[in-house]
Amino acid sequence: MAKILLVDDEPSILSVLSTLLKAEGYQVTPALGGEKAKEHIESEEFDLMLSDIRMVPINGMELLRMVHREKPALPVIMLTAYGSVETAIEALKLGAYDYITKPFKVDELLITVRRALEHNKAVTENAELKAQLGARYHLENIVAESPAMQHVCEMIKKVAPTNAAILIQGDSGTGKELVARAIHTYSHRKEKRFLAVNCAALPEPLLESEMFGHMKGAFTGATANKEGLMEAAEGGTVLLDEISSMPLAIQGKFLRVLQEKEVRRVGGNRDIPIDVRILAATNTNLESLIGEGRFREDLFYRLSVIPVVIKPLCERKEDILPLAYHFLRSETPQGRQPPTLDPEVAAILEAYAWPGNVRELENAIKHAVTFAQNDKITREVLPPRIASTKVTAPAAAAGTEKTDKIDPEKAKSLKAFLRAQEKEYLKQVLSMTDGDKEKAAKSLKISLATLYRKLPEADESKDG
């Protein structure tokens, strides 16, 4: 229920408006004059203020200035007598949301109140969303169990406070934009905008316009002047994703932007000073493109003052399960317990090669959560290409008294090892009962359904 502060020095107007707004379901606090309104503003929180302009000793304009100073997020609707429109316009310049002239129409008043409250709600939600996005890109929300990702996080901490250009390198889906946003979040530019452009997604003319802006009439369809990303992100950060796809002609113009800290719109004749931090990302070896004449060497050295390399997911297996649980929590509605991973699924996730990297893992978890039953992620609900992954047991040291020394870097997870050993034992018991699953289940003291679930591979080998 929205709380409205209603201010007027005429008791009759105050009474009529209070009755009208309460009938619409609003919680109304009437204040007889500006002094009483000041007391309420200082001690309570409101969603909207309706105030008359002509009051004594504190008039509505003074009250508006105070609200703008003390409670800048509080929308204000001013009530003014007919013929005082100039004063109402001055109120708008001071930050009022809108004004209504007396005598007012009931429908007009209610519509204006509703719009003001909706506007305030949208502004509040937008602020909360920005706060959530800012939190999302904090380092504590980047999964970094592996030494490789821990190194990336350390790099972010060190380079974020600087203005140095940074080249983020990594395969598609490794999280290059996540790292770029974290750099912005930890920089002194965090209050300004972060804007990204995919250089591979736009043809050359549109990419140039998107980056540098254009003047009216510069090309067909340019019906108005337009600022580019470099201007729009003033004081903030620009990420040039897929920088390897930037055409050579634009590379030369962009190099000048980096050197001169100025941008010239397409079709323009004036250089516009800019202050932006440039981050670039690529999944291609730029040095090889330089050798092929497809990327400027001087631009490469300008962009790669500090290189940050993100390794593919298959080379940082320690991150796989923590990432999986992170995505499970993200996909679970607030207040509910996220599903658990079946041990077999955990082994499959660790064994799979993940050619699509973190993005593929995220999509796989979304797929699994959609089809999961009984709050458990099983092999059956994984995408088929991942579910078909074979998890093999570590080779046994047959015929030797002493096992070979295990390389910890190449060792399978404990869950995968125990699962493989369990399967082997169950197969032996099944063989001892001549394939009678009911006898085997009784011998093992488990249900027949559990045995069927645990031995899909044993069934295949027996039937084949």
Image: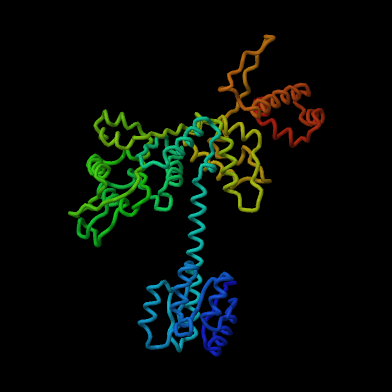
Left or right position of 391 against 183: right
- Farthest-out residue, top: 400
Left or right position of 85 against 217: right
Q: Position of residue 231 (x, y in %)?
A: 30, 53
What is the count of numbered marks? 0
Q: Position of residue 255 (x, y in %)?
A: 25, 41
Q: Residue at x 45, y 41 (%)?
A: 179
Snapshot colouring: rainbow
Quadrant (top left, top right, bottom left, bottom right) of the N terminus:
bottom right
Q: Nearer the viewer, residue 292 or 9?
A: 9
Q: Residue at x 62, y 13 (%)?
A: 404
Q: Position of residue 460 (x, y in %)?
A: 65, 28
Quadrant (top left, top right, bottom left, bottom right) of the C terminus:
top right
Q: Is residue 8 above or below residue 431?
A: below
Q: Position of residue 347 (x, y in %)?
A: 61, 31
The image quarter containing residue 290 is top left
Q: Nearer the viewer, residue 268 or 155?
A: 155
Left or right position of 452 against 75: right
Q: Is residue 115 above or below residue 368?
A: below
Q: Nearer the viewer, residue 447 or 44?
A: 44
The image quarter containing residue 4 is bottom right
Q: Is residue 48 above or below residue 203?
A: below
- Farthest-out residue, front: 57
